[in-house]
Image (cartoon, rainbow, N blue to C red):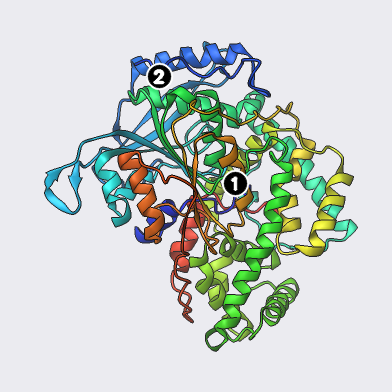
Amino acid sequence: MKAAALYSAAGSLLLTTLAAAPAGGAPGAPGSPGVPGAPGTAELRGTAVAVARARAAGIDFGPCSAADVPNAPAGVRCGTVTVPLDYAHPGGKQIRLTVSRARATQKDPHNSKRKVPRQGALLYNPGGPGASGMYFPLIGRIPQWKRIAAAYDLVGYAPRGVGRSAPLSCEDPEHFFKGPTASPVHPSEAYKRQRIARAKAYARGCAQRSGSGLRFYTSLNNARDLDVLRAALGEHRLTFVGASYGTYFGALYATMFPSHVRRMVLDSAVNPDPEKIWYRSNLDQSAAFEERWADFRDWIARHDDVYRLGTTPARVQRSYDTARERLAGKAAGGKVGPGQLQNAFLTAGYYDDFWPSRAAALSAYLHGDPKPLVRLAAPSPETATEAENAGAVYTAVECNDAPWPADWRVWDRDNTRLARVAPFETWDNAWMNLPCAYWPVPRREPLDVRTGPGELPPVLILAAERDAAAPYQGALEMNRRLAGSVLVTERDAGTHGVGGGPNTCVNGYLDAYLLEGRVPARHASCAPRPEPVAVASGGSAGKEARRDALKGKGDRR
């Protein structure tokens, strides 16, 4: 998955709107012979030790620092949870994860006289790898989340490596945001050699700046950390919402600790097939972005009266290519080149509420006014440290999680073929992940995500049919692998992260599940959300820039 812009509808809506022993028996046995790809019993024992310590210690919540949740309202409190760096050695080095919480309001938003029973803590992860969920408790202010906020303590956290949770770094943040940069659709051999050298240097930097602990930043350890968090919060079983990459380690958790699950929502599910983690998953993602880019171009063409970029998708493509060529010759504002243009339009592949601002900026640039594009796409030094950290965590987790091709010729062959039919994102995605070819840390074999009938409570999977960042096939595969799970599809839609957003049908299923434990009897579907309204001004570029920064958007080009 790309580190850029992985966030659920919950986080998207929020940041745009606001400027004891587990019940049900023993833990699942990730070290048992029946769980292929899992580590040995040392990690299992270490997790049990860490869980017992966390249950005894709890979390000492107090005021949030500006580094955790800036300007946090009084109802949001922060604390830390201690976990082992290496679960095989729980008495060794410890790291602290930052946690945020807003207590359940227990107030019915539709009847102020009615007290709502508290159902425990709801933990949330927005994806990445590399994104922080520290802002999640603020979601309770949004109307779509008030009923859930009445019943649950809303708990966010920064996963290992993120923010102040034992942060990772792979290069000097001052060098992370660079502009202008190139973004060739069909790169030359000379450009490829430059990118290979850069990928090797980046991988070395990760080892040098992050030290010997680098290999412990994995999805399996993220799942173990989640169990420690559950215990520290005093929860017998876990209620969890994971978005995007959060669905993957949520599924790992369900496989490793099925009896610890109370309710689990997997929003915009990653394909958990071990053969897809992560090299093939990124190829699938690049192909899906081409389809979403076509959707965006079609929308722009239907609003040519507003944007004057072409009356057909092909003509819109020519307008985009013209802008790319001009920016290659002269950067807008001295900072925005083809690479920055590509980054700005990539976010439109994640969220269609970004379509108006991107189309308006492109139109303004081609008609003589570069300022909107510069405001939208120029690198932001103020967010460089946060973005570099997010990129480092993304790289470390994905590189550590699974084998990657070590032969450049495999990368070159696969991406050259794919770029012939899916040029929009293919090579940029390859460059993002190429450090994994030269990774200095031993790789793991992915866990075979799978549960049998009756092992796990029903899991609710949410997916948009045209999601590019988490292609729909992944939701179908997740549904097949988690016995008893139920899939709700937003048809003919492509926004990444659908729960708690503007679709009332999807939200009805989400509320019924989290509040009452009800799931549809079979696969359910919802009509798509309304298309964005075409406006010439583009609207919320400032809010979007902040949202990108919070999600860990970065550029290693």
Query: Residue 228 shows which numbered tag?
Result: none
Q: Quadrant of residue 293?
A: bottom right
Determine whether the residue tagged by mark 2 lies in a helix, strand or loop. Answer: loop
The residue under label 1 is which amino acid type? Leu
Q: Is residue 168 above or below residue 548?
A: above
Q: Is residue 77 visible?
A: yes
Q: Is residue 411 above or below residue 104?
A: below
Q: Is residue 370 visible?
A: no
Element under label 1? Answer: helix
Residue 357 versus residue 240: which sits nearer the camera?
Answer: 240
Outermost residue on the left side: it is 113
Which disc number belongs to residue 24? 2
Q: Position of residue 520 (x, y in %)?
A: 42, 46
Residue 323's place in the image compared with 381, above or below, is below
In-image side of 144 versus 403 (left or right): left
Q: How far is mark 2 from mark 1, CA to CA?
A: 28 Å
How many neighbours does mark 2 have within 10 angstroms: few (below 14), some (14-19), or many (20 or more)? few
Relative depth, front residue between 246 and 537: 246
Furthest-front residue in this view? 521
Query: Image quarter for residue 439?
Result: top right
Who comes first in sequence, dot 2 or dot 1? 2
| Tag 2: amino acid | Gly
Q: Could you tell me how many numbered marks the image carries?
A: 2
Work out whether residue 34 or residue 500 is closer to the camera in this orientation and state it: 34
In this figure, which residue is indicated by the disc labeled 1? 476
Name the residue at 52% across, 61% down.
Answer: 491
- Say few, some or many: other residues with alpha carbon within 10 Å of mark 1 (under 14 / 14 to 19 / 20 or more): some
Q: Where does residue 418 sit, x and y in percent of width and height?
A: 80, 57
- Picture coordinates of residue 264 (x, y %)? 44, 37
Q: Taking 516 as reference, is 293 above or below it?
A: below
